[in-house]
Image (cartoon, helix red, strand yellow):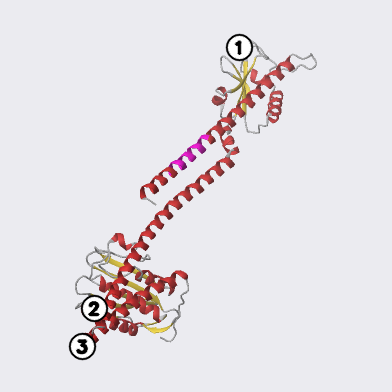
Amino acid sequence: MNKRVGLLLIFLTLLSFLGIILSQLYWIKNAYDLKKDQFDKRVLMGLKSISNTLFELQNAGTEKRVFLIDNIQEPSDSDYEHLNYVLIDSLLANELICIHIEDDYEYAVYQGKTKNIIGGHFKHFQAEILSSEFKVSLNCVRSESPYYLALYFPSHDNLIIHNMLAGFILSGLFVVILGFSFIYTVVVIFQQKKVSLMKNDFVNNMTHEFKTPIATVSLASEMLLRPEIQNNTEKTKKYAKIIYDENIRLKHQVDQILQIAVLDKGEFRIRKKEIDVHRILDEVIQNSEIFIHERKGSITKIYSAARPKIRADKMHFINIISNLLDNANKYSPEAPEITVRTKNIKNGILISVEDKGIGIKPDDQAYIFKQFHRVHTGNIHDVKGFGLGLFYAEKMVKEHDGFIRLNSTFGSGSTFEIYLPFNDLRNI
């Protein structure tokens, strides 16, 4: 996919996601306003019904007549005692039940002009009651300078939100899932793009690495077919050795790729047995010294581990150390100076391979153990390899219940440390 097209799709998807969030917030606000409007209308209708009932009771026949306030002269402090609480409480309770409102409420009857409260049931919300939108004129009680009955619901807004809580949670959950899916998809796309680039790099590099020895073998074979070369024993041996060396090189490269294929399939097996780390290190170093000495380099051994025996898979252990020594050699532009150390720590052995090469940049250190990742020093083919050695090494060390870590300063060299436990080895 074209980079610009990919970024455009991500931008449009993000824009759509933000649009969905804004739409959800818009509909939630509309739902809240609708719920509040319905609640307000029901309360006002209920208060109007109470006013009508009071009018009917006060104008009924003498025997059935009931007054809200027995003393309906000018309001005074004594009117508080004349308010018919049984009547008003009964009317409010019945009416609110009829309109399906179960919220806690407080009420008061007050004089319209002076705002003097005649009576009611309230605690700390007098000011709120006097300014409440839920009020009805009681001109049936007093036509001039009428009284008002006002209600206040302290937890009104919270109750509306509580009633809509299930919708809020579902909307929020869907938005979170959608957002997580979007972020995950973007991350996966970029990771896949990066892996794709690394694999392309790997294929191109592998083609180059295979092409060189194949061309060399082809040329050496062609030379051996010439009569003048066949009659010269020294030249015959020389070209035969070239073919042999290039064949070994090809075999090593193919084996490395096959090892990673086995790792990816999970078909590898760890066969642990007692091994002497120092003895195996000597063998691997001896094989690697040929290439080191060709570049006029050296390998120094400092064995400080008093207990060098562990339980490990010998083949994989050899491959791990070989990969580290190979990297130390490849990434040393001058004559390699490599030091191999051992010491015992935490019921195991710590093996370090130190070089004085080019080192590794901090940006690369985070990805050094990733599959196909290679530290380039310029041209992609200036250092041979497929970017598989350290990936393989970390995988195998973890399978042995150990760890591998890197200490490196760019321009000053690198040190790889491997810890492998004894694994309950007896009779060391």
On the image, the x and y values in percent for residue 327 come to 29, 72
- Disc 2 residue type? Ile
Residue farthest toward the right in the current orientation of the protein: 63
User: How far apart are the two marked residues, 3 and 2, measured between alpha carbons?
Assistant: 26 Å
Q: Quadrant of residue 57?
A: top right
- Disc 3 residue type? Glu
- Disc 1 residue type? Ser
Name the foreground residue: 89 vs 374.
Answer: 374
On the image, the x and y values in percent for residue 362 come to 29, 61
Residue farthest toward the front in the current orientation of the protein: 227
- Residue 19 lies in the magenta stretch: yes
Seen in the picture, residue 293 relative to 370 is either above or below; the reply is below
Q: Is residue 332 left or right of residue 166?
A: left
Check contact, mark 1 vs mark 3: CB within 8 A. no
Seen in the picture, residue 106 relative to 406 is either above or below; the reply is above
Q: Residue at x 37, y 69 (%)?
A: 391
Badge number at residue 59: none
Q: Residue at x 50, y 37 (%)?
A: 23
Q: What is the magenta range? A: 14-26
Q: Earlier in the sequence, mark 3 or mark 2?
A: 3
Q: Is residue 367 left or right of residue 176?
A: left
Q: Quadrant of residue 283?
A: bottom left
Give the mark toward the camera: 1 or 2: 2
Q: Residue at x 53, y 34 (%)?
A: 29
* Residue ID for mark 2: 292
* Residue ID for mark 3: 234
Name the foreground residue: 400 vs 387.
Answer: 387
User: How far apart are the two marked residues, 1 and 3, measured between alpha carbons?
Assistant: 131 Å
* Residue ID for mark 1: 145
User: How far apart are the two marked residues, 1 and 2, measured between alpha carbons?
Assistant: 110 Å
Give the mark toward the camera: 3 or 2: 3
